[in-house]
Image (cartoon, rainbow, N blue to C red):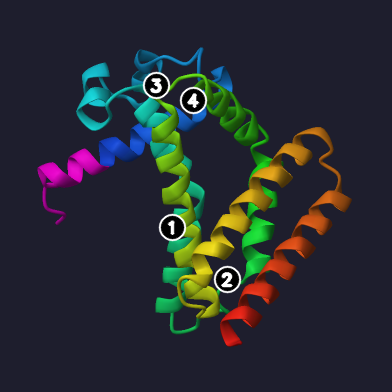
Amino acid sequence: MEQNPSRRERQERTREALLRAAAEVFAKRGFHAATLPEIARAAGCSTGAVYSNFEGKEDLFLALLGLFTRSLRNEQDTTSESEDAAPAPTSDYAARRWTQQLDEHPETMLLLVEFWLYAVRNPRVRPRLAEGFDRVRDEIAELITQTTGVPAPHTLDAAFAAQALGYGYAMLHAIDPGPESRERFRKAVGWLHDGVTAEADG
């Protein structure tokens, strides 16, 4: 018989529900039009529960920023722990997952651009978005280390380039989502992988 969840477990479940709801509401309404009561209703929570887990709408959006790279890391951890594991995710796998994310959720880049414009014009928010980008780079760097064995500081340099490639591709994809651009992006990520591996070996 399952034991009653602890307070920490309940709070974590609430936080995850709010993040899932926020992703859906932001995608549907955009950052500016979305409201915390709307997100709380979508999560089946009270507005107070939002403020118990996040400082506000900006904080909630920033918490979503690194979910994609963290999910890739979780997939890597699961693969590594499996006895019958398939080969670990490679740079090409990560590139394919990012293009898949944009194909299935084209609002991803629109939301990022919307919040980026908001942050650039808001001196209070801009440093927080920069910190969010830093955390994403750290996640990417750890993923690169897991999948290639390349140590720091090479991974941080590669993560910076990968982040720029990924966001740049997303902007182009929003205008021209054809297969040719996907293949070019995957090829560029492969060049990056080969370059950082060669530099580390050298």
Q: In the image, what residue type sits under mark 3?
A: Ile
Q: Which residues are magenta?
A: 1-12
Q: Which residue is mark 2?
A: 89
- Residue 79 drawn above or below residue 189: below
Q: Nearer the viewer, mark 2 or mark 4?
A: 4
Q: Amino acid at mark 1?
A: Asp
Nearer the observer, 199 or 112: 199
Q: Residue at x 84, y 50 (%)?
A: 181
Which residue is located at x 55 percent, y 60 percent? 159
Marks 2 and 4, how far apart at CA: 33 Å
Residue 172: where, in percent of width, then height? 78, 40
- 80 vs 32: above or below: below
- Earlier residue among tags 4 and 3: 3
| Residue type (three-letter) at the residue carrying disc 4 | Ala
Q: Residues within 10 Å of mark 1 (few under 14, many from 20)?
A: some
Q: Quadrant of the N terminus?
A: bottom left
